[in-house]
Image (tube, rainbow, N blue to C red):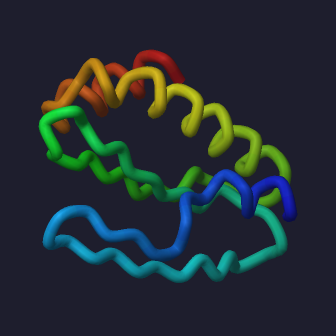
Amino acid sequence: AGLQSKLIPPMHFKHKSLSVDSTFLPMEKIGGDYFDYYIHEDGSITFLLCDVLGHGIAAALIASMLKVNFYEQAPKKKDPAELLIELNQKM
């Protein structure tokens, strides 16, 4: 649970005129809920919000794999459809 909580970005951030606050309350101690964001060089932001099917360790591991793939692909794919297609293929 401690490791998974480190996968989630800070619960509050500001970027230009955008202020984001979030709360992460998993249904169980660990699971597949995951959200993140990536700020592009031009200042635009890509958000990712997902729920991996299932609960427990397996879902948490898949969520951690998704984080790695998201950070690899988000700088390359600004278009949401292209990003999701690439993430789907990688996963």
Q: Residue at x 22, y 33 (%)?
A: 41
Q: Is residue 78 left or right of residue 9?
A: left
Q: Is residue 58 left or right of residue 69?
A: right
- How far across and how far down the image is residue 2, in percent? 86, 63
Q: Residue at x 73, y 56 (%)?
A: 6
Q: Residue at x 83, y 72 (%)?
A: 29
Q: Is residue 42 above or below residue 28?
A: above
The one of 61 and 74 positioned closer to us in this rendering: 74
Q: How many marks?
A: 0
Q: Is residue 36 left or right of residue 53?
A: left
Q: For residue 65, what is the image quadrant?
A: top right
Q: For residue 63, what is the image quadrant?
A: top right
Q: Is residue 86 above or below residue 4?
A: above
The one of 5 and 87 positioned closer to us in this rendering: 5
- How far across and how far down the image is residue 21, in percent? 40, 81
Q: Is residue 29 above or below residue 50?
A: below
Q: Residue at x 60, y 59 (%)?
A: 8
